[in-house]
Each structure stands twice: as C-alpha cells, then as structure tokens.
C-alpha cells in the first residue's frame, strides 16, 4: 500500500478510537498486532497483544464521561508501511480530572490493517490522571 493509503488507515483508526468504538478499533488491527506504551505506568506501559490492548482501552474508556479518549492528529510523516503521527488527546474522567496529553505514535500498517504501534507520551501526566488516587 502507498504511504498515502497508510496515512488514511491511521486517520480512520484515530476517528474510530475517538468515538470509543472498541470493536471498530480491534477490527482495524491485525490478529498479531502489538501496542507498546513508553514508561512504567501500571496497567498501561509495556507491550500488549491485541487482547491485552482491548482490555486496556476498555478500562480507560469506562473511566471517562464520554466513553472515549479523543485523538486529534496534528502532523503526519509517512514512509512505506510506517506512519508517524504527532497527536493530542482529550477526555474528561468520571473522577473530575481532565486528560489532555501530547503523543508521538509510530504505526506500522500491513495489508490494510495496523500491525504495531509505539506510543510515546507524557507519562507523568498519564500517571497523575489515571493512576494517582
């Protein structure tokens, strides 16, 4: 697939993610997909397989007032099967906190679906909003 097609796949993924459609999110991942998150955030950081990612996304979504974390792509760079995206997130949590983070995602696309993601983010902000009591 072309770099432009891969950018479109990632853009559509972010739209579905922002809607909180967990089944739609999973449909856009290959069966052997992996999702890696930087840092040492309990329950979030490290590498997850598709089932582990579903569990994490479902848990995060259930803690928000909207049922989703909105992802807004700010800039794309694509080459071959790799798509890098600078992104901003936003959601309000049921505990009254606001999650508004900046990311650098590196997506790998294979046969029209996402096969791996590396997620770099402000881990201190994520910990303060989702983990700290």
Image (cartoon, rainbow, N blue to C red):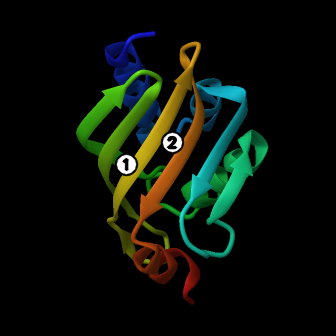
Q: Quadrant of the C terminus?
A: bottom right
- Does residue 67 appear anywhere in the picture? no
Residues at circles 1 and 2 in contact by the CB criterion of under 8 Å = no
Residue 85 appears in which quarter of the rendering? Answer: top left
Q: Secondary structure at mark 2?
A: loop
Say which residue appears at 69% left-offset and 55% top-offset: 47
- Does residue 38 appear anywhere in the picture? yes
As drawn, 78 above or below 71: above
**Image disc number at residue 57:** none
Say which residue appears at 29% left-offset and 45% top-offset: 72
Say which residue appears at 49% left-offset and 61% top-offset: 64
Q: Secondary structure at mark 1?
A: strand
Residue 78 appears in which quarter of the rendering? Answer: top left
The residue wearing badge 2 is 20
Side of 13 where 34 appears, left or right? right
Q: Residues within 10 Å of mark 1 (few under 14, many from 20)?
A: many
As drawn, 80 above or below 104: above
């Amino acid at each position: 697939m072309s770099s432009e097609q891969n950018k479109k796949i990632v853009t559509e993924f972010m739209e579905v993610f922002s809607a909180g459609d967990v089944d739609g999110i999973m449909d856009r991942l290959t069966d052997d997909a992996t999702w890696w998150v930087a840092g040492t955030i309990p329950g979030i950081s490290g590498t997850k397989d598709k089932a582990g990612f579903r569990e994490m996304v479902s848990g995060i979504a259930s803690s928000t007032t909207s049922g989703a974390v909105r992802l807004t792509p700010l800039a794309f760079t694509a080459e071959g099967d790799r798509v890098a995206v600078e992104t901003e997130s936003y959601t309000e949590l049921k505990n009254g906190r606001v999650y508004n983070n900046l990311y650098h995602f590196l997506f790998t696309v294979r046969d029209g679906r996402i096969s791996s993601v590396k997620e770099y983010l402000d881990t201190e902000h994520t910990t303060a909003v989702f983990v700290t009591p």
